[in-house]
Amino acid sequence: MKYRRILLKLSGESLQSEQSSSIDADRLRQYASEIKRIVQENIQVAIVIGGGNIFRGSMGESLGIDRVQGDYMGMLATLINSMALQSTLESMGVYTRLMSGIKVEQVCEPFIKRRAVRHLEKGRVVIFGAGIGSPYFTTDSAASLRAIEIEADVVLKGTRVDGVYSADPERDDSAERFSNISFEEVYRRGLNVMDMTAFTLCKENELPIIVFDMNKPGNLLKIVKGEDVGTLISMN
Ligand code: UDP
């Protein structure tokens, strides 16, 4: 296996489907079984899941909810998704721990780096909920930060497109997918991989990112084996 410890970032929207506007049961099961497959290969798996299918801080403004309050609502939304994924994984026999950036004592542990690493070493999937616990950040930033803290080998950003393109592939037929690209080239071309805070954090800590299609069965396993799936963003 190419990677030993990974951080998987999933957006909240990835849990939506045409049938379900918030959390789709089939999607949850599909993701959980992809994750279980790599746990069986002894890959240490940490996960950050977004909350955009339920609430984003920016949605609050049109409702007259101030930004900070809205961001905490967004963080709670990520916890709801994290709890759903945790339950699904556990129902499939995968051991998990949910750690939160804000205190929700009845439901999960607070994030403590040493404890997170210990869970991973014991083969438990660790889900980081509530982002980093501070407003004005996103779960992409949480994914980068937590990955650095736990010394993950790579951030795997699961999306519905199969990598980083030279232009938007949903709008421009001439768009080409990069198999590898450097952090510098992403800046130079103004490509949208993650928000800039999250992206810069990875670059400054030389943490590679792979953007890939999480909806294609088997992709996650292929990536940890080192197969050429999605786009690898690295220092060179
Ligand atoms: N959020 C935050 N701090 C964090 C992580 C998330 O304030 O560290 C809030 C923010 O309002 C964000 C929302 O939680 O819009 C949901 O997260 P995100 O938008 O990253 O979810 P995704 O787009 O991945 O579904």
Image (cartoon, grey):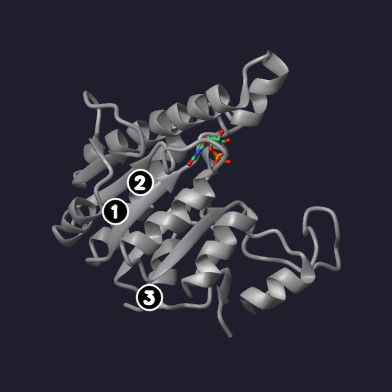
Counting residues from the start of the chain, the first of labels 2 and 3 encountered is: 2
Q: CA distance from mark 2 to mark 3?
A: 18 Å
- Residue at the location (51% across, 34% down)? 51
Where's residue 56, x and y in %? 59, 30
Q: Residue furthest top?
A: 64
Whether residues under marks 2 and 3 lie with C-beta atoms below 8 angstroms apart, the answer is no
Q: Give the labeled residue for mark 3.
A: 225
- On residue 32, the disc is 2
Where's residue 205, x and y in %? 46, 71
Q: Amino acid at mark 2?
A: Ala
Whether residues under marks 1 and 2 lie with C-beta atoms below 8 angstroms apart, the answer is yes
Report the front residue among 62 and 213: 62
- On residue 36, the disc is 1
- On residue 85, the disc is none
- Residue at the location (62% across, 20% down)? 66
Where's residue 223, x and y in %? 44, 70
Kind of element beneath mark 1: helix
Q: Residue furthest bottom?
A: 236
Report the front residue among 13 and 58: 58
- Residue at the location (42% across, 47% down)? 48
